Amino acid sequence: MKTVPTLLIHGGAWAMPDDAVAAHEAGIANALAAGYSILEKDGSAVDAVEAAVAVMEDDETFDAGRGSFLTSDGRVQMDALLMNGENLRTGGVACVERLRNPIHAARLVLDRSPHVYFVGQGAEQFAEQRGMALCNNSDLVIPRELERLEKAQAAERAGHGDTTFSGPHASDHASHDTVGAVALDAHGNLAAGTSTGGTLNKAPGRVGDSSLIGCGCYADNRSAAVSLTGWGEPIMKLVLGKWAVDRVAAGASPDEAAHAAIAYLFDRLGGHGGIILLGPDGRIGLAHNTPRMAWGIRTPTGIELGVTRNGKT
Ligand code: ASP
């Protein structure tokens, strides 16, 4: 029996200002179009997720690819994970600095390596040897982010640590613009992908939740597909992606599991973020405890885009 193809995307969860909403919605609409055109042609969930995430990496609106947040020494360092729920094949890269689309490198790891995860220069070398072009790190740095880093570091010097979220004072007002997608294809297979430049002013070499299997991303046909965004350290400590899909496997609806995960994140560690979940039956879950979250969904019946406020859809 064929399942109903579904593509669900997020483009970050934070106190997004009004003037950033249109760009987030446009970016998500473009990503939905790219990913869904694959699902419509009977393509696989993993292809759809990879295509959708790549579109958002190419869009400077988001904290992924060019336009990512900068490390404390002014560089772009990116992490991405792609997972196929049919067979649990997974590819992850972290701390890559010279790849425009880390999600494509993650796909190469998924398809063409017995390993699951590559970091830094080894990841770049792996991708280059399999045909990906390397860029200069400066090609990924944009003026908006240089300015943002300067402000964060000035605030840090002035003792207002909560404008960065590399430290213990991360707040729900910090920007979390990571991108992610979950898909269900007509053959009943799930996939998930997440890509990020991490957190603003992070220490060089820091890896967040986004690309860690079971933390910011996970997919298994027997449970659900999930992608998260938010303050990475608490999400990692709770292995929150796996926590959420396990609840779906145990009988919770994706909606219940999504809300429970965000409640757990806050209750246990005071964490902030957002989550998207998609079950093998096409039911979805969406929750966040940040002032806003950007998301979009596409099914055969149409497209819905939203920047939800205050955790209410
Ligand atoms: N979760 C990401 C990280 O901690 C940041 C984000 O979601 O924007 O690296």
Image (cartoon, helix red, strand yellow):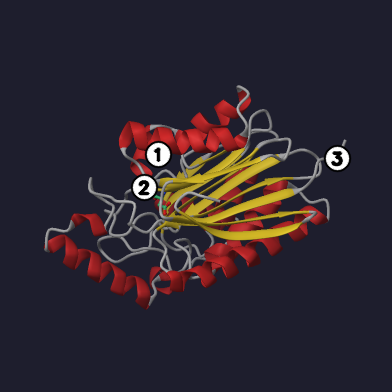
**Label 1 vs 3, first from the N-terminus:** 3
- Residue 125 at x, y percent in the picture: 49, 55
Mark 3, other Cα within 10 Å: few <14 / some 14–19 / many ≥20? few
Give the answer, above or below, for where 145 lies relative to 280. below
Q: Amino acid at mark 3?
A: Lys
Mark 2, other Cα within 10 Å: few <14 / some 14–19 / many ≥20? many
The residue that mark 3 highlights is 2
**Label 2 vs 3, first from the N-terminus:** 3
Residue drawn at the location 23% of the way across and 48% of the way down:
169
Q: Amino acid at mark 2?
A: Trp
What quarter of the picture does the N terminus occupy?
top right
Which residue is nearer to you in this view: 12 or 186?
Answer: 12
- Residue 34 at x, y percent in the picture: 69, 63
Circles 1, 2 touching at the beta carbon (< 8 Å): yes
Tag 1's secondary structure? Answer: helix
Residue drawn at the location 67% of the way across and 58% of the way down:
304
Cα separation, mark 2 vs mark 3, equals 37 Å
Give the answer, above or below, for where 71 lies relative to 108. below
Tag 3's secondary structure? Answer: loop
- Residue 43 at x, y percent in the picture: 79, 51
The residue that mark 1 highlights is 235
Residue drawn at the location 63% of the way across and 58% of the way down:
52
> Does residue 296 appear to the left or right of 173 in the view shown?
right
Decide if residue 219 is in sight here: no
Decide if residue 229 is in sight here: yes
> Does residue 188 appear to the left or right of 98 in the view shown?
right
Residue drawn at the location 49% of the way across and 62% of the way down:
99
